[in-house]
């Protein structure tokens, strides 16, 4: 082999080497770039899916809480409807009771209760209009004195009150009174009544 | 054997060929880089499209999940309401009597 041949061969060998090096580096660069792209794509995809998952989870948590609240309200409303039914039945029973024999004892109790609260010697009783059973002044006086043990003067007022039953017990000067009509007692004792109804119907829930 | 000039020309030609090969290789690399950038962008775009579709699918499932949650909670509520109504039928008289006792001062 001549010197020229050798030089040409050396040039070609060097070119082969450089060309191979350039292409190898380019292939490596390509591989690395694609790996980075793949990694970034995965990161971006994870970010999108993770955000969607978080939004979904948060919305479902909110929805569940809201649904539970609606259900709680529904249950409370159902209980309230039942309580209202009981109250309505009780009102009807009270009206029936006002016309019954047992009512006289009830009325006596309400009068004595009013007298005990007022703690005076002279009292006036105001009955509902058209009440069939009313205690006489003498009977009321006896009941109060038997219970309290103190002489008491009782007057039956000519005034009447609009009510289904019961009595207003008041001082003669009309300054103080106890409204023991059925309607007033139902209103005044509403929280006790509701508690008692709940205890009777839903003992574990009160 | 050629003349000295011929020898020099051959070496020169070999150098020119080598230079051309390297230029071709560099051109190939530029082309490859461009293709790589395009391919990388495609990978990212395609993955993003897939991810957005997956996210949409998740959000579509939301309505089904809501219906399931509501169904489960409401069925419990309906059972509870039915239970209360049943109890109230059995115990209403007792409750009414209790109310009467309170209103009429027996308790």
Image (tube, coloured by chain):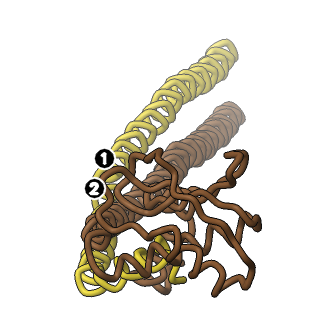
Chain colours: A brown, B yellow
Residue at figure coordinates x 44%, y 61% from the top left: A182
Q: Is residue A151 above or below residue B21?
A: below
Q: Is residue B19 above or below residue B90?
A: above
In the figure, residue A145 lies in which quadrant? Answer: bottom right
Q: Is residue A162 above or below residue B67?
A: above
Quarter holding the N terminus of chain A is: top right
Find residue B5 and report its horizontal and vertical position in percent.
Answer: 67, 12
Residue at figure coordinates x 42%, y 44% from the top left: B51
Nearer to us: label 2 or label 1: 2
Q: Is residue B30 above or below residue A182?
A: above
On residue B60, which mark appears?
1
Find residue B48 and report its horizontal and vertical position in percent.
Answer: 45, 38
Find residue A76 and report its horizontal and vertical position in percent.
Answer: 42, 63
The subunit letter for the residue under badge 1 reads B
**Number of disc labels:** 2
Residue at figure coordinates x 57%, y 45% from the top left: A47
In the figure, residue A141 lies in which quadrant? Answer: bottom right
In the figure, residue B98 lies in which quadrant? Answer: bottom left
Foreground residue among A139 and B22:
A139
Foreground residue among A96 and B70:
A96
Tag 2 near tag 1, CB within 8 Å? yes
Q: Is residue A134 visible?
A: yes
Query: How far separated are the C-alphas under marks 2 and 1?
Result: 8 Å
Quarter holding the C terminus of chain A is: bottom right
Q: Secondary structure at mark 1?
A: helix
Q: Is residue B15 left or right of residue B40?
A: right
Residue at figure coordinates x 56%, y 42% from the top left: A44
Question: How busy is the neighbourhood of tag 1: few (under 14 within 10 Å), some, or many (20 plus)?
Answer: few
Q: Is residue A176 left or right of residue A114?
A: right
On residue B64, which mark appears?
2
Q: Secondary structure at mark 2?
A: helix
């Amino acid at each position: 082999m001549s010197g020229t041949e050798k030089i040409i061969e050396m040039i070609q060998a060097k070119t082969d080497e450089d060309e191979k090096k350039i292409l190898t580096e380019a292939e490596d660069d390509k591989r690395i770039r694609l790996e980075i792209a793949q990694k970034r794509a995965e990161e971006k995809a994870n970010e999108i899916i993770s955000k969607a998952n978080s939004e979904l989870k948060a919305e479902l948590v909110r929805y569940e809480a809201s649904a539970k609240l609606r259900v709680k309200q529904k249950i409370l409303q159902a209980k309230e409807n039942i309580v209202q039914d009981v109250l309505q039945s009780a009102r009807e029973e009270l009206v029936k009771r006002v016309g019954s024999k047992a009512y006289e004892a009830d009325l006596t109790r309400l009068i004595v209760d009013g007298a005990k609260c007022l703690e005076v010697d002279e009292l006036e009783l105001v009955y509902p209009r058209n009440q069939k059973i009313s205690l006489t002044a003498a009977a009321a006086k006896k009941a109060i004195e038997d219970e309290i043990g103190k002489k008491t003067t009782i007057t039956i007022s000519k005034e009447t009150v609009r009510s289904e039953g019961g009595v207003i017990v008041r001082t003669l000067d009309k300054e103080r009174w106890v409204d023991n009509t059925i309607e007033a007692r139902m209103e005044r004792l509403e929280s006790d009544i509701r508690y008692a109804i709940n205890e009777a119907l839903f003992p574990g829930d009160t | 054997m050629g003349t000295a000039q011929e020898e020099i020309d051959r070496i020169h030609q070999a150098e020119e060929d080598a230079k051309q090969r390297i230029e071709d290789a560099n051109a190939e690399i530029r082309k490859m880089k461009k293709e790589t950038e395009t391919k990388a962008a495609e990978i990212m775009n395609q993955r993003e499209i897939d991810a957005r579709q997956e996210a949409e699918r998740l959000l579509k499932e939301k309505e089904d999940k809501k219906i399931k949650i509501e169904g489960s909670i409401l069925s419990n509520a309906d059972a509870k309401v039915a239970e209360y109504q049943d109890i109230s039928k059995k115990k209403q008289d007792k409750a009414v009597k209790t109310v009467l006792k309170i209103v009429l001062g027996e308790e």
